[in-house]
Amino acid sequence: MKSFLHLFYLLMLCMITKSSSSKHPLCHDNERAALLQFKLSLSISEFASVDPSAHPKTKSWKLTRPGIDCCSWEGIGCDMTSGHVTILDLSSSFLSGSIHSNSSLFELVHLHTLSLADNDFKSSLIPAKISVFSNLKNLNLSLSRFSGQVPIEICQLSNLISLDLSQNLLKLRQPSLKTLLESFSSLEVISLKEASISSRVPKMLANIKSLRKISLANCGLHSAFPKGVFLMPNLEALYLYDNSNLVGHLPEFRNTSKLRALSLGNTGFSGRIPTSISNLGLLTVFSVYFCNFQGPIPYSLGKLTKLTILELSLNQFEGQIPPSLANLTKLEFLAINDNMFTGEIPSFLANFTNLSFLELGNNNLHGSITWIPNLQNLVALDLFHITLASPVEFDIFIKLRKLQLLELSNVDLILPIERQKNDTFPQFLILQLRACNLTRFPDFVHNQTNLVELDLGFNKIQGFAFVLLPLICNLNYLSLRNNNLSGKIPPCLGNLSNSLLTLDLSGNKLHGTLPELFTSTCKLEAIDLGINQLQGRIPRSLVHCSFLVVLDLTGNQIDDTFPTWLQGLPQLHSLFLGSNQFHGILPNKVGLGFPGLRIIDLSNNKFTGNLPYNLFLSWYAMVADARGDFGYMGSTSITSAFGKHIYSSTVYAITMSYKGVQVSTAKVLKIFTLVDFSRNKFVGNIPESIGNLVGLEGLNLSYNNLTGGIPSSIRNLSNLESMDLSYNMLSGEIPQQLTSLTFLEIFNVSYNNLTGPIPLGEQFNTFGNDSYRGNPELCGSPLSKKCGNSQPQSHSLPQPQLDGEGDEESSALLEWVIISMGYVSGLVIRMILGHIFTTAKHEWFAETFQRQRKPNKRGAR
């Protein structure tokens, strides 16, 4: 019996010892104190995190009793043996405040995982003291408003496996990208999205065989991308989008590739998609929007049956859509818009029932869309400029309950005659029904409480449609351009100025005076009321629209003096006042304001007097040579659909007339600059200060009564592409220095009193007789009159009356007149502002802007 009790005692002692040893030790007092002090150094703000699942994790950090185990607090992980804090995950915790080098955070020296992602650290620098975390393997500081230079000390974290510094305001100069990569031999994840790197991608990147994910999107990368990176053996995700100066080609892919996501959108990658793309059997994301890819889509792309996102938009792909794509039934996002695809709209799309986004617009596709109701998950549908089998019943879209973005054009659309009680329309965010042969305002629109963008332009809507508009209180963009609207603009439309960014009512039959619509809460960025029958003065309440970028009143009957008071609008970029009844002189102070102005059109009015000597001294936006500042004038609205952000952009466009032919740019580059004072009664000399506008691209002073010589300072306008000084009374010789204007495509000095030899060389060798006719004292090539010969030149015509009132026929002769200001609104899921332009007969415009093929576009993911 004694032996049995002894054995039982030993067994119990063993079990107690084992139980005691299995319980992990409590966290260390100094680390508990450090955590509590770190909590107290920051505040909780509901605006500090954007993740829908965000919550304040530090709320559980409470000292409810002495010696409480901090390892049980949310976001904390401890080593089971030592009790040291090794994991600190405070991502999406609503933290707000600054982090300095004396923060108690740096007392947690045993950390191997640190995540402070998705918080707001108030533009703090990343402290150099981060080097104390010598054991760190995972560091995530993304989306937390860190700023400044990434400290060189981060390179001392040699054990890092994952580094995420994305979506902050960081710079990577010293260390450089190459230095940073060389510091980590076992790196598997590198994410520097939106960090300012501005360098080449080092070739040694391809040598880090351990890498699984590379995200270098929107980092200012440039030059050739190392092709070997695509072939890295363990690479699963490569994100390079929004590096517009990064160039390269796709390689021949190996069948051993582990790639699951490849995103190259808005870069300079070019060439064709290789047939070996089929070797990427694991690929779920393939995005190459807005690159320079061309040729047909390879049939082998249809073998990528795991694809959920396929973005091929804004390239030069051509041919028919291969039937093999019918295999891609898992697609949720399909964008092939803005290419050169031909043939029928594939009927197999009816089987893509997982699709949320479908963009087919701006291709040469045609066919029926009767299958559209099958796609019950559609959120966005772009069928812009596609030839649809007409007529199309709008009822087929009503069945898509989740639809929030719809873009149609050039189709006979049949609206519901009467809304039935049981009809439930989708709640649209963006609705574009352009050129759909509509004769009435859609009744269902006034119940669209979520609508932010409405485009009903280029229809046949008659009468007075504004009565419904005040009911749509959230609109950012409204276009009713080129309809048959009549009547006066009602004051109640001003209620929309609190939300509207763009208002386009151009090309209608609106009359009466412009009401004082605008209040101190005005948010308008663009107003186009051109080509109507509006009278009176420009409403002075426009001074409240401090965000105004574009104002177009072209082609009305407005009777006013020059609105000098508009110089109080700091953002004003483009001012179109042409073809009205403006009169009087240009005050001297016109030249002392408008610092942001890049386009001004005063053509075909009744302005008189001299051009002020200081006219061009303070137009600083034209003084700067901004050719590197690519991008487009426009506004952007951001909305949310089913937890995802949807980006919609509105980009302003202009239509010009050159030799009576319309030339359109579908989008106005921010850098485009134009001065058009033609068809007025200006007198006196052209101010020498014109030479200050070195960024100027178009100058038209034709059909005035200007005298004196052509200023030699014009030689400074190194970006000038078009200059028209015709139908004035200019005298003297054409300055030889103008041959330095190497971009000059159009030059017209006809019907003046110019004398002497025509300059030779450069662009002047390309101008014909029409550029000089009506100047009998000019001589030299291309005229038949040789210099030193008293014989008159042939083909000269009588000098016309120079009163600025030429008839319709002469008004079409070699002029550059802005005739309307429009807006191109895109159903765009990202902010991709494609550089698309159209020309009619005059290819010079296309060639000129081809030099600016790669604007700097903003992307979002």
Image (cartoon, rainbow, N blue to C red):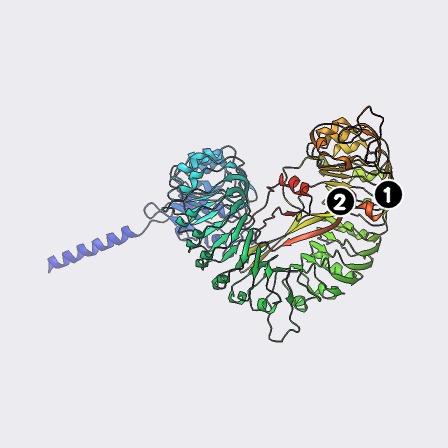
- Quadrant in which residue 735 is drawn: top right
Query: Residue 355, position in %: x, y?
Result: 50, 60
Residue 533 percent across, percent down from the top left: 82, 56
| Residue 106 point in image, percent of width and height | 45, 40
Residue at label 2?
Answer: 659
Total label count?
2
Q: Is residue 625 left or right of residue 194?
A: right
Instruction: Give the image location of residue 243, x and y in percent.
Output: 54, 41
| Residue 80 visible in this rendered orientation of the protein | yes
Helix, strand or loop at label 2? It is loop
Please report contact status of discs 1 and 2: CB closer than 8 Å, yes or no. no
Count residues near mark 2 (Cα–Cα under 10 Å), then give few for <14, some for 14-19, many for 20+. Answer: some
Q: CA distance from mark 1 to mark 2?
A: 17 Å
Residue drawn at (21%, 53%) of the image: 14
Q: Which residue is tagged 1?
A: 804
Query: Which residue is depicted at the point 73% across and 45% down?
Result: 574
Side of 32 relative to 270 (left or right): left
Residue that protrudes farthest toward the top in the picture: 788
The N terminus lies in which quarter of the figure? bottom left
Crowding at dot 1, Cα within 10 Å, few <14 / some 14-19 / many 20+, comes out as many
227 is higher (above) or lower (below) than 297:
above
Q: Is residue 502 above or below residue 419?
A: above
Labels 1, 2: front one: 2
Determine whether the residue tagged by mark 1 lies in a helix, strand or loop: loop
Task: Using the image, tell me which numbered label, if any, was put on residue 202.
Answer: none
Q: Between disc 1 and disc 2, whose residue precedes?
A: 2
> Which of 90/840 is in front?
840
**Residue kind at label 1, given as amino acid type:** Gly
Pick the residue in front: 348 or 577: 348
Camera-side residue of 612 and 345: 345
Residue 94 in view: no
Amino acid type, callout 2: Lys
